[in-house]
Amino acid sequence: MIDFAGLETRPAQTWGAARLVPLVRAEPIRDLRLHAKIYGDEPSLVALPDKTAYTAYIPHAFVASWTDDGTPAAAYGTQLGQPLRHVGVRVRRRLARREVKNRLRFLPLHLALEGFLALHFGGPPVVWEEWSRRAIAQGLSPRAEEAYSGTQVRGLDDALRVFEIYPGQCGLLLYVGDTLASAFVVPHPEDYLALHPTLVRDLYGELIHHYALFYPARDFPAVIDETTVSSLADLRGQAVRQEREWAAFHDSVMAAGLLGSPERVQQVYRLGRFVLARFLPSFERQRENHIGETITDEAGRLAYLKTFRLSEAQCRRGYLLARLAEHDWNVQDTAAALGTDAAALGLRLDRAGFGYLLRQDVLDAYRRAKR
């Protein structure tokens, strides 16, 4: 479960379809700091550990700096008395790369997206008769998913520009059309001030792009019982009560889908007492499914979080792949577990974009059976 202990919700601000919910730390994390490295608008070739690569738009990277003895760390470029070092930008980049001692450069959201794209990427491990030669030889290659830049989410740039940043703010929950689009948490308020503009450069799902066009954010007005207010202290008490009620409503209802337990968590890198990891959801139907990445300390306290909301189509693809893998890619067994038959499952795979994994004669037979 994603542990938000130490982070408190503040009243939301709305702009058009966007609702921005601040997250404030009572005590910031001082021995881990983040800052951004801005790249150009040209696509980049990202090298993966298995010696494969993919082309992606990489607007920026995060650089994490930490100390091993618990003393405060400064964001790179702000240290006094040390000459600034220029870290060159290369065409080929690993998702997470150690630049110098106690400094790691990683690509935000690309860690999570690569984990999703690599989900059962190798295809069927058992050569069942239904699978095509291409499925056995190439698996799910090529695998592609769509995402939108924040500049394509209507009104997001204006919302982030006019957003009031709270004292001690270390994060943000972004809703579009009252649907949770993304969560962003950093260790220190100064990091958030520096990284807040990068939210418009991030990637967002297809669902969020459409909701920004058609679904305005609703108002949740604060209602104060005027009969109980006779002084400034009474008014302040009513305002505090409204903040607490909003936080309780938000955490139990609006953010409930994010607070659930990730299905798979993979450690990517260790940063002193911190761990950089990525996670995948359970791909349950008719519920929110978020992929993302975290940095947590040895006690599990959240220092960094960035998430991506999957669309319904992406959830269906992840769900089908996960169920097939559970049953060794046996179509008959998987169909039985899903309460359907092989023909129906085959057509579901075809609609999800995985029809090329099945032999053409098998897929044609499934279509005839359903007709």
Image (cartoon, grey):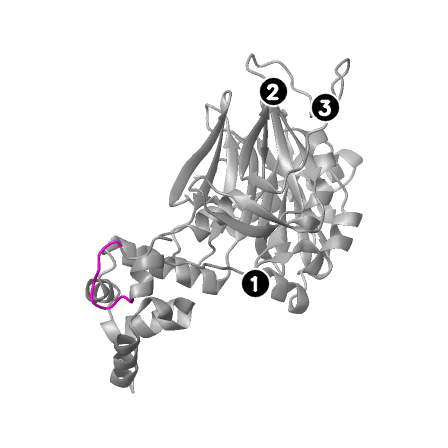
Task: Assign the N terminus to one quadrant of the image.
Answer: top left
Dividing the picture into quarters, in which one does residue 206 lie? bottom right
Residue at coordinates 44% horizontally, 59% vertically from top-left?
315
Per the image, the residue denoted by label 1 is 207
Q: In this rendering, is residue 149 above or below 24? A: below
Residue at coordinates 66% horizontally, 28% vertically from top-left?
188
Quote the CA–CA distance across marks 3 and 1.
41 Å
Magenta segment boundaries in residue numbering: 125-132
Q: Position of residue 257 (x, y in %)?
A: 48, 51
Label located before the other in sequence (3 or 1): 3
- The chief SS type of the magenta part is loop
Kind of residue at badge 1: Leu
Q: Nearer the viewer, mark 2 or mark 3?
A: 3
Under circle 3, the secondary element is loop
Q: Position of residue 200 (x, y in %)?
A: 70, 50
Label located before the other in sequence (2 or 1): 2
Nearer to me, 276 or 94: 94
Per the image, the residue denoted by label 3 is 85
Dividing the picture into quarters, in which one does residue 242 lie? top right
Kind of residue at badge 3: Arg
Label located before the other in sequence (2 or 3): 2
At label 1, counting other C-alpha atoms closer than 10 Å, the crowd grade (few under 14, some 14-19, many 20 or more) is some
Q: Is residue 127 magenta?
A: yes
Per the image, the residue denoted by label 2 is 31
Task: Locate residue 370 relative to residue 27 in the image: left or right.
Answer: left
